[in-house]
Amino acid sequence: MSNVELVAVGTELLLGQLVDTNTAYVAATLAENGIDCYASHAVGDNRERIANLVREILERADGLISTGGLGPTVDDLTKEAVADAFGLELVLDSAALAEIEGFFASIGQTMRENNRKQAFLPQGSLPLVNPHGTAPGFIAFRADGKFAACMPGVPREMKPMLAERLLPWLRSHFAVREGIVTRILHTVNIGESEIDHRIADLFTSSENPKIAVLAHDYRCDVKIMAKAASTESALVSIAPLETELRSRLHGHVFGIDATTLEGAVLAALDERAERLAVAESCTGGRVAAALTAVPGASRRFLGGVVAYDNAVKLAQLGVPEETLARFGAVSEECALAMARGVRDRLGAEIGIATTGIAGPEGGSAEKPVGTLCVAFVGPRGERAWTLQLRGDRAAIQSRATTAALGLLWREVKIS
């Protein structure tokens, strides 16, 4: 089976100064087109280390695809390293030089001598034209036929080069006849270990399509991946497995593919023709922000109150002083009072509230940092939950937002 490995070149990646988005994009594109990627790597701007990595990869893979290191500066060394690894000379490619000269002419700038360096490619390479910049890509070939396909690191240059130049060559080179189609089942209110417990046998019994589980902050995705000659054929093979997964995860699958949790909440509210109001303390408006990011949210979301201080809970939401004195602001009783208050004051059918301790300070033995209380008040009753979340302040607030939306979805959709 033909396979490639990916290489991201750049010392800035190793120093954490730049996030590598290229590798994820290239990997996803290859998967969609049925080309297997077995590993990815990052390496700094060092000629010897890049060359050694190229040699190492091609001991096991049919080819490698790299991004970065094709610029005009002295630390752009990908071409030189590949040439070293393959025992090739760098030679001037006149067509590549003409493309670079034409690019500078089109933007009315003078081409510097160091840009001429970019037109030197490993001998025998197949150039990959770059109409969006000055760095041509190339595919260099080792004597045994294995290859290194190198593209610039700038995403706006790399992405069209991949789609228009490299991908057609890869599909032809590997005689690809199949692609991979992925269906994603989004779940909430269920942990990764519980999902694994429920579907463990399907991991081993299903190879094509196959299953993967990816955990996020307080929710999980179950991915079904099928390799087939067409999207239609892949979806046909996915359908029975999807049905089985939905059955085993009943009550937790809120959507597929591009569906978001907040979008699923608003869709469920649409089905019941009910309107929502939100009262937030520890989430600081994040639940409202998530909902209002969805186009058309105004049909079902009326508004919210960020009641961070107890005085706001009292004055704006009508939380009884006795409730705060007896149970405290972080309590199911307070959350229920907040939910009732925001529902009544905004004239909604449903109210939901969050209150908790995001940290890093403010916790106690009885109510440690990460304690979250969520309350739901609606036509089908009142409910409250206490959860214990982990992480730093930002993680707790993010997970609290997801937890609140997940519980809201369940109450509106399932109850």
Image (spheres, helix red, strand yellow):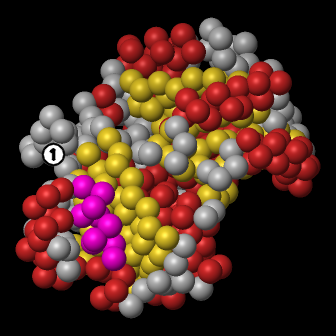
Q: Is residue 224 magenta?
A: no
Name the residue type under label 1.
Gly
Q: Residue 314: image x %, image y %?
A: 14, 76
Dominant secondary structure of the residues highlighted in magenta in the image? helix
Tell me the quadrant of the picture where the C terminus can be found. bottom right
Q: Is residue 99 left or right of residue 246?
A: left
Residue 404 lies left or right of residue 140; in this view the side is left
Q: Residues within 10 Å of mark 1 (few under 14, many from 20)?
A: some
Task: Tell me if 386 is positioned left or right of 227 in this view.
Answer: left
Residue at position x 62%, y 80% from top?
A: 272
In this view of the protein, which residue sits in the foreground, 238 or 405?
405
49 relative to 170, above or below: above
336 drawn magenta:
yes
Q: Residue at x 54, y 43 (%)?
A: 190
Of residue 64 and residue 365, the one placed in the foreground of this image is 365
Residue 144 horizontal/vertical position (percent): 72, 13
How many marks are shown on the rendered structure? 1
Q: Which residues are magenta?
A: 331-340
Indicate the position of residue 131 as horizontal and vertical percent values: 54, 59
What residue appears at the point 62 percent right and 14 percent down from the top-left corner?
Answer: 58
Q: Quadrant of residue 249?
A: top right
Please tell me which residue lies in front, 269 or 223: 269
Res. 110 in view: no
Q: Is residue 281 above or below residue 395?
A: below
Name the quadrant of the N terminus. top right
Q: Position of residue 402 (x, y in %)?
A: 42, 55
Residue named by callout 1: 359
Residue 310 appears in view: yes
Tell me if residue 124 comes above or below residue 362 in the rendering.
above
Element type where label 1 sits in the image:
loop
